[in-house]
Image: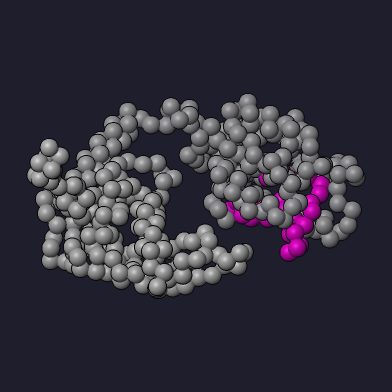
Amino acid sequence: MDRRYQVFISSTFRDLVEERREIMQALLEMDCLPAGMELFPASNESQWTLIQGVIDASDYYLVVLGGRYGSETEEGISYTEKEYDYAVQAGIPVMGFVPANPDSIPAGKTDKNDAAAQKLAEFQAKVQNRMTKEWSSPEDLGSKVTRGMINLIKTNPRPGWVRGTEAMTPETRAEIAELRAQIAQQEKRDVEGSIITAAEIDKAFAHGDEEIAIEVNHRGYEGYKPYYEDGNISYSWNEVVEAIGPFMLDEAPEPLIRNALESDVLRSIQESPEIWTTTWSSQTAAISDSSWGSIIVQLRALRIIQTGTKKRTVSDKAVYWKLTPAGDDYLVGLRAVSHDPDFRKASD
């Protein structure tokens, strides 16, 4: 299987531009994926989380030292050394490259103060405790990177990246197909198990003309000033089912069903001026969450409704409800118009 490895390149930047170019060219010729500060400003503290993520996603880590220690963090450590320490801590295989002739580095590419030079020397000593190679020119560095990477890959195998079409073996594909079949069977069993087939409602629970007190928040306007009043309105279970049942002949989202009952409640409020304020404009009626929850629980207990079973998009978070066969029969009994045997006689 053809694998490509992501390699993080860490170094100071302005003094090693040519060297970094040679490293990237060497890695590309090996079908590796170079990653480094070209992707982000290494001196920006706010980018540290991004840098960590790129290092974590890399298979190997290369650090190149020149004549400068580099810009420092608030802790007094250079960003290059901070990256190196993180890679070591994360268990990423690392390889260091140090100058073979540090005294020959041009003055413009070296630190100008003794403190930075001392930190660079200590950092180089740290790097040389692990696998390192010396370099003398950009071209020499590119060559050393190629040979070093061949050895690093051989001695430290890593997952790498593969094409999606090559990522799965025939055995893996067969296993996935089997798992999908098992999931499909389980989903079918779940759907079948969730379907209520009882022909009658469970009359052990309150139903028919027995009533429920629904908590309502009634709102409206007089001019531009809003007003509201809270109260209870009594509904029989037959009235509840008559109001919302038709919306659940097919599966319907819960917000739509709740709005249907609230519209019916508002109509009842507007027909009761002796109890509620009916002179406001733009009136609304909102059923409390507690009352709505009680209604849903009761209708489920009566075996009038059940949750929907149709597949929907992942983004659709609504709960869907539909009538059970018993609920459908119950609604028909409430709302269907009976035949009047005397109608033909009266019209003749």
Location of residue 135 in the rendering, given as x and y in whole percent from the top left corner: 74, 38
Visual colour scheme: one colour
Q: Is residue 325 left or right of residue 171?
A: left
Residue at the (74%, 32%) spot, across then down: 21
Q: x, y percentage for residue 124?
A: 72, 52
Task: Locate residue 273: give its quadrant.
Answer: bottom left
Instruction: Work out whether residue 327 can be spotted.
Output: no
What is the quadrant of the C terminus in the image?
top left
Q: Is residue 68 magenta?
A: yes
Which residue does the image show at 90% across and 45% down from the upper left?
A: 107
Q: Nearer the viewer, residue 116 or 279?
A: 279
User: With 293 as the anchor, is 111 left or right in this view?
Assistant: right
Q: Is residue 8 left or right of residue 202?
A: right
* Image quarter (top left, top right, bottom left or bottom right) of the N terminus: top left
In the foreground, 253 or 53: 253
* In the image, residue 302 above or below residue 311: below
* 223 w.r.t. 274: above or below: above
Q: Is residue 178 magenta?
A: no
Q: Position of residue 284 (x, y in %)?
A: 47, 61
Residue 263 visible in the displayed image: yes
x 33%, y 34%: residue: 172
Residue interval drawn in magenta:
63-88
Residue at 47% of width from left, 72% of height from top? Answer: 229
Camera-side residue of 337 and 108? 337
Q: Quadrant of residue 149?
A: top right
